[in-house]
């Protein structure tokens, strides 16, 4: 059973970059069986898929955030990361890392991290 | 982008009652790529149904999913104490993957 754990600052200043890392245990991030995803949840917008990455480094982003988002993968550390630039208070949310299968019929999210709250405030 | 609209926003029911939750998609999900999640306070969502009607591992059979096209339903046949939570639908038919706004099932 995969386990995911997010780490990173809980407070980010407006206009700065939000950075989070997800550490995967119980399986290899190099596996061709998974996509690795970031999802956020805020009171105003509910659950929002941010983007996903495959072990090859191929990335897929939601269009509204694409100009500001980078998801990367570190196979040697069994980690993947999220960077969101130029943050505003609207980016305050609980940020989850999650995983889905690699075939289309498995693209739902079946393992989730605990999800830290990230607050954007000066 | 496919918009998912869930109704009702809140469902107030008693233990043992039947819960019927609705999820309507703005476009047809012809491949039936719709999942349901349960979220309890302070926890991450947990998938309970995928592919419209397939229960995830360990999910009791009082949970069932149905529907086709644009209209989908999650039914909890007899509410147990641990079922009171917020439920979300999610489509993975067309990117970007999107979620409904949730239905809260609360104790009456």
Image (cartoon, coloured by chain):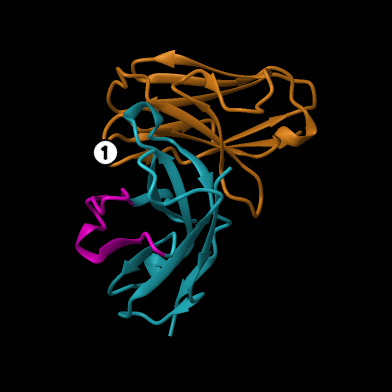
Chain colours: A cyan, B orange
Q: Give, as a single range, the part of the protein colored magenta.
A: A52-76
Chain containing mark 1:
B
- The residue where tag 1 is placed is B95
Above or below residue B40? Residue B64 is: above
Q: Position of residue A73 (x, y in %)?
A: 34, 60
Neighbourhood count class around disc 1 (C-alpha, 10 Å): few under 14, some 14–19, many 20 upward: some
Decide if residue A109 is on the left or right side of residue B82: left
Above or below residue A102? Residue A7 is: below
Q: Residue at 58% across / 42% down in the picture?
A: A1
**SS for dot 1:** loop
Q: Residue at 66% across / 28% down in the picture?
A: B58
Residue occupying the far left of the picture: A67
Magenta-drawn stretch contains A53? yes
Q: Residue at 79% across / 21% down in the picture?
A: B16
Q: Position of residue B83 (x, y in %)?
A: 71, 33
Q: Position of residue A11 (x, y in %)?
A: 48, 78
Q: Quadrant of the C terminus of chain A?
A: bottom left
Q: Quadrant of residue B71?
A: top left
Residue occupying the far bottom of the picture: A122
Q: Residue at 33% across / 68% down in the picture?
A: A83
Q: Position of residue B33 (x, y in %)?
A: 37, 25
Decide if residue B51 is on the left or right side of residue A52: right
Magenta-drawn stretch contains A55? yes
Residue occupying the far front of the picture: A76
Q: Nearer the viewer, residue A64 or A3?
A: A3
Q: Nearer the viewer, residue A112 or A95?
A: A112
Number of disc labels: 1
Q: Nearer the viewer, residue A17 or A64?
A: A17
């Amino acid at each position: 059973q995969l386990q995911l754990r997010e780490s990173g600052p809980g407070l980010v200043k407006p206009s700065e970059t939000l950075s989070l890392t997800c550490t995967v245990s119980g399986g290899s991030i190099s596996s061709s069986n998974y996509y690795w995803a970031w999802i956020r949840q805020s009171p105003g917008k509910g659950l929002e898929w941010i983007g996903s990455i495959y072990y090859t480094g191929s990335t897929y982003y939601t269009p509204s955030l694409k100009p500001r988002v980078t998801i990367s993968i570190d196979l040697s550390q069994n980690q993947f990361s999220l960077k969101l630039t130029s943050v505003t208070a609207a980016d305050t949310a609980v940020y989850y890392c999650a995983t889905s299968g690699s075939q289309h019929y498995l693209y739902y999210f079946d393992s989730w991290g605990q999800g830290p709250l990230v607050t954007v405030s000066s | 982008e496919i918009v998912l609209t869930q109704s009702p926003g809140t469902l107030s029911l008693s233990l043992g009652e039947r819960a019927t939750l609705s999820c309507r998609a703005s476009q047809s999900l012809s491949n039936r790529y719709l999942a349901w999640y349960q979220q309890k306070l302070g926890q991450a969502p947990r998938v309970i149904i995928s592919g419209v009607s397939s229960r995830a591992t360990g999910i009791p059979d009082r949970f069932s999913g149905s529907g086709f096209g644009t209209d989908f339903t999650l039914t909890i046949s007899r509410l147990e104490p641990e079922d009171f939570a917020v439920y979300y639908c999610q489509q993975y038919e067309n990117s970007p993957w999107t979620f409904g706004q949730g239905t809260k099932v609360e104790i009456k």
